[in-house]
Amino acid sequence: MSFKSSAKRNLLAGSAAAALILSLSQAALAQDADLEDEDIVVSTGIRQSIKDSLALKKDSSSIIEAVTAEDIGKLPDISIADTLARLPGVTAQRVRGRAQAISIRGFGPDFSVALLNGREQVSAGNNRGIEFDQFPSELIAKGLVYKTPDAALAAIGIAGAVDLQTVKPLDYSDRQFNVSGKYVINDNGDLNPDFGADGYRLFGSYIDQNADGTIGWSVGVTHQSNPTQFFSRELKTNQFQVGATEDGVVFPTDNPRSGVVSRDFERTSIAGALQFEPTDRFAATLDAYYSDYEDTGIFRGVETPLASWSGAEVGQVNGSGPFATSATYNNVGPILRTDTEGNTAEIFAIGLNTTYDVSDRFRVMGDLSYSELDRNDIDYESYAGTGTGIIGSGNADVLDTLTFTFPEEGDYTINAGRDYTDPNTVLLADPGGWGQVGFIKEPEIGDELTAIRLEAEYDIELDWVESIRAGAIITNREKSFNSNEAFLRAGTGFNEDREAPIPADSIEGATDSGSIGLDILAYDPASLIDNGTYIVDPANSTAWTVEEDIVKYFAMANVGFNIGDMPVTGNIGVQVQDVEQESTGTLAFPEGAPSQEQTVTETYTEVLPSLNLSVEVVDNTYVRFAAAETISRPRLDQLAANQGFGFNNTVCPDEDGDGVREYNAEAFNPGAGQVCLGFGGGNPFLRPYQAESYDFAVQHFFSDTGELSLAVFHKDLSDYVIGGSTVVTSEEQAVNILGQAFVNANPTSAVTTVGAPGNFQSGDVTGFEGNLRFPLEALVDSLEGFGINANYSYTKSEIEDENGRSIRIPGYSENVASGGVYYEANGLQARVNVRYRDGFLSEVQEFDGSLNGAEALSETLVDAQIGYEFQSGALEGFSVNIEGYNLTDEPFRTENDLVDFPGETFVSRYETYGRTFNFTVAKKF
């Protein structure tokens, strides 16, 4: 990837400045080669983790939440997202059973930013939101959730930012060597015969320093194979997917999809750091992170077309409403689906940070970083059934009668009249008669981000200002996506009816669909493309590239003064962002003309002031206030320049039919939508979501492991993105279609409409948070080692569309709570954690791979752990631990409104992931 000329100049200037900082370090080495040795005592455990987290929170100028590892490689969860989700105002959405997407204060992953060691990172999905399981918890030393920004922060969204930090070797005074092994098992069992329910996680870490403590190095390695086994039910209950009896009892009439999913997440990750602090004036840190993972899986199940178009007939429907308790359907042609699902990805990130104290009052810093991701997905659908074209055939020899039961919880069952595990019954086929026996998508995602940061800080002697900090951050990011789609046609082995026996050597057995009740034949379709059984016929694919060049200039005053006896600290500053975004996609011409690639460029500037103040009103009691203007950049797929267009024949008629347009300037009226060109699809002119944010918090730290805090926040939102029509001026696009001479002669022809996501709406979000951490020994000495933590947050969102209908923010839950009890003494550790969230707008993957909002129901998750570390003797440093996650087997459920019954809903999606147990042994040397 290459920078544009302006970015290149900035990068060259920054590189020269970084070289200057490095050269100044040589002078520092000559001036001060000796350092006083300082012993650093590193404590571990639950209480030490709480102590470290509260210290970070107490000392921060911003309003933050923090988590720190109990020991090297020991954050207490499978995923860092699970740990973050226990913090006030933070929640996680489970994706395929793994906590992956983070919401902060009611805003989903599109509204926050993920940092690694203070630097913005590439993301594994096809948008900006980080999939947090791309970072193994063993390699994370601490996580900071910024709820308010300051001007110097590298990046933050409307919701906030999550900064994950790896180990710094000079934080330790001696050698540290840690290893651990974990056995993982899921109690759903082997739902598909070719995927196991157990796995493992291995971890090793080495940290060391030279004798003088001026050079430190660390490396951590983790390798894992984590299983996922879950039952999947998609009943599909929106208003267009249901019918009703004469008595008004509702029943499904679309195409329920039911089955089992097995996945194996294999990953090898490495994090390392090299620190160099030869003097008390100069420091340099080089850190790197690499991850190579493969997430393989398979869905095996059935689609059961129940709609009238399928020829299915509704038989007996039972129940008094509003939703049926059971229903029988005749003449159903089940489509047996074997979908190979998964992805492979490589992530690499590296950064070099140098700081130099030019004098006792003047400091400079330079930071260079680079991160990249290459990801390849697969969604390979293989179809089977009792024959080709059975749907709508009326042929009783190949059709079936199915009876569904519909419990209120949503875990429906299916009773079939045929045995779909019998290879004599099941064929490779085209059950729907669509002309295809399968479909394959192999999306490719590329993401690359380069950044340079230069800043200086000067201590000044004013009554209320302690120092001035200023600098610039220059970033270039390019993200690309290609869906790579193809139909699979009948090839070798199929007869003229597009039917073929399933190869005997590909049969694995049968699925275990549990209470769903409809097992199917399990076969491996991996060889069917290579051996010619399937013929690949390329389909129209979606492809786009978005590149962003951003220069952020910031200036910030760090303040410190007293109001009476109360010390006041904080900062006030501003960040100015110059943005150039370039989007490349496909422009589809009307009337079947060939499409062409187009590139659209947009530039804009954002000015973002911020203020953070903290007043220590009495010892260890702080009152904090923050105000800021923040932005969240729009989704990358919404910025994509994949568009179709049409001519307005009133403004740009082709009166003589020769294909050459004329221009009727008198008809031009953009306010009424009367413009020459109208585009639809993506919107490369999108601007960021905007928010004015205000925060007020009171925090009391009654011990180094105890805290009571209360906070309120309010965000005035503007430029909220929803679908609509926008009037924009784009000479670039107009010239592309009409020609330069036409646009020169008719300048207003460059004014166009874009029917796409646009910055249309405004609203507000207001909330309250409370948090308590309390060591029970403060009440009774006999409870030494016991402690509790509890937090609750309430968020109210008020955003409406042009028709006054409420707009739900993805990831928004009105009520969120988390709590737990822990015990730690004499090497024994135990804890139980519970977290709850209200219903929320989740994002689930649709047939075309896009994400769509679905109303998820409330959920309560329970986890527990118990372990022991030997304190002395031959086993000193050896520990064992047992962990259980999702102990109540809480399902993930979504629902739809029953439009004919106001206030009534019924479950649409129901997934159960089972309980996961980890058995860990570890040793510290």
Image (cartoon, rainbow, N blue to C red):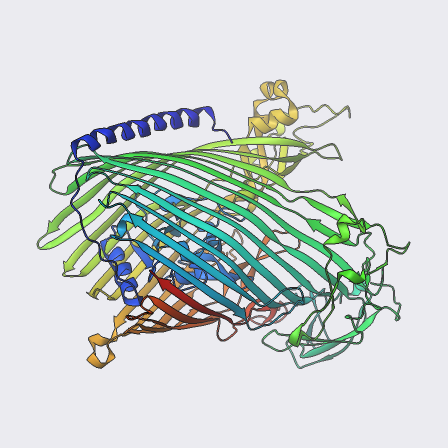
Against 298, residue 8 (above or below) is above
Indicate the quadrant where residue 193 lies.
bottom right
Tell me if 58 is positioned left or right of 600 in this view. left
Q: Residue furthest left?
A: 564
Q: Residue furthest front?
A: 874
Query: How many circles with numbers are drawn on the protein?
Result: 0
In this orientation, which residue lies closer to the viewer: 233 or 572?
A: 233
In this orientation, which residue lies closer to the viewer: 96 or 307?
A: 96
Tell me if 199 is positioned left or right of 139 in this view. right
**Can you give x and y, in whole percent of width and height, for residue 685 in the image?**
52, 36
Residue at 50% from the left image edge and 29% from the top image edge: 2
Q: Is residue 729 visible?
A: yes
Against 602, residue 802 (above or below) is below
The quadrant in which the C terminus is found is bottom left
**Can you give x and y, in whole percent of width and height, for residue 429 in the image?**
82, 58
**Can you give x and y, in whole percent of width and height, for residue 846 in the image?**
63, 56
Q: Is residue 896 visible?
A: no
In this orientation, which residue lies closer to the viewer: 257 or 135?
A: 135
Residue at 29% from the left image edge and 30% from the top image edge: 22
Residue at 57% from the left image edge and 64% from the top image edge: 228
Residue at 37% from the left image edge and 58% from the top image edge: 178
Tell me if 683 is positioned left or right of 165 in this view. right
Tell me if 8 is positioned left or right of 410 in this view. left
**Can you give x and y, in whole percent of width and height, for residue 265 in the image?**
55, 58
